Amino acid sequence: MSIPELKRFPIGQFDEPEEIPDTQLEEHIKIIKNFPSKLKTLIEDFSDEQLDTPYREKGWTVRQLVNHLADSHANAFIRFKLALTEENPVIKTYHEAKWAELQDSASLSIKPAMRMLKGIHQRWYHLLRSLTNRQFERTFHHPEQGRNYNLRICLAMYSWHCHHHFAHIENLKNTEGW
C-alpha cells in the first residue's frame, strides 16, 4: 500500500466478512458503546489550530472528521431503525464530502458533534443490546450500491468506521507530536 493510500486507509479498507459469529458481534457492540469516550480522550486537549489541521494532504480536518462521524453515525442509527421497522427499506443516501464542507462541519466547535455522538451511541448501544439474532438479519437496501445490507454486516462496517477515523486522528497526533 502506498503512503497516500496508507494515510487514507490506515487500518485498511473495510473487508466485509462472510459471516459474523456472535462473539464478534459482541465486540462490535462494545466498540459502538465505547467509541465516543475513546474519541473524547484522544482529542479533548486539541486547540482550534489542531482541530483545523487536515489528517492528510487534501483530506478533511480533525474538526470535519468529528462532525462527519456525528453525521454518519446518526444516519447509521436511523438506517438500523428503518430496517427494524420496515421490510427492506430503501435508505436515503447523502453526499458526505459535501456535508463536510458545510459551515457547521468546517468551522463550528466540535462540542455539539461530540454530544450528538455520545447520545447516538448510547441509544444505538441500547438498541443493539436488545436485538435478537433474527433482528440482526433484517436488511435495508442501499440504492447507490444496488444491494441489501443486513444489520450484522452494517454493524461490522460502523465498528470499522470508528477505528478508521480514530486512526486518522491518532496518526496525525503522533506524526505532529501533539
Image (cartoon, rainbow, N blue to C red):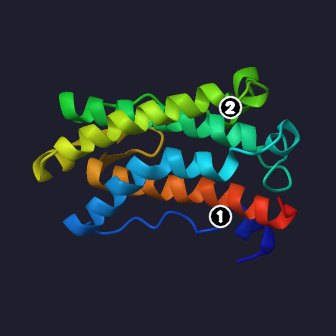
Q: Residue at x 44, y 28 (%)?
A: 92
Q: Amino acid at mark 2?
A: Ile
Q: Which mark is residue 9?
A: 1
Q: Residue at x 73, y 64 (%)?
A: 171
Task: Choose the circle earlier in sequence order: 2 or 1.
Answer: 1
List x then y, in percent, for residue 85: 19, 28
Residue 51 visible? The answer is yes
- In-image side of 150 versus 171 (left or right): left
**Badge 1 local density, few (<14 within 10 Å), some, or many (20+)?**
some
Q: Which mark is residue 110?
A: 2
List x then y, in percent, for residue 96: 62, 35
Cα separation, mark 2 vs mark 1, equals 23 Å
From what the image shows, is residue 104 above or below residue 139? above
Mark 2 against mark 1, which lies toward the viewer? 2
List x then y, in percent, for residue 164: 58, 58
Q: Quadrant of the N terminus?
A: bottom right
From what the image shows, is residue 164 above or below residue 19? above
Q: Residue at x 17, y 42 (%)?
A: 130
Q: Nearer the viewer, residue 118 or 95?
A: 118
Q: Nearer the viewer, residue 167 or 136?
A: 167
Q: Nearer the viewer, residue 156 or 125?
A: 125
List x then y, in percent, for residue 128: 26, 44
Q: Quadrant of the C terminus?
A: bottom right
- Locate residue 79: give its quadrant: top left
Q: Amino acid at mark 1?
A: Phe
From what the image shows, is residue 71 above or below residue 9? above
- Locate residue 63: give its quadrant: top right
**Badge 2 local density, few (<14 within 10 Å), some, or many (20+)?**
many
From what the image shows, is residue 177 above or below residue 148? below
Q: Residue at x 54, y 59 (%)?
A: 163
Identify the element where label 2 is drawn: loop
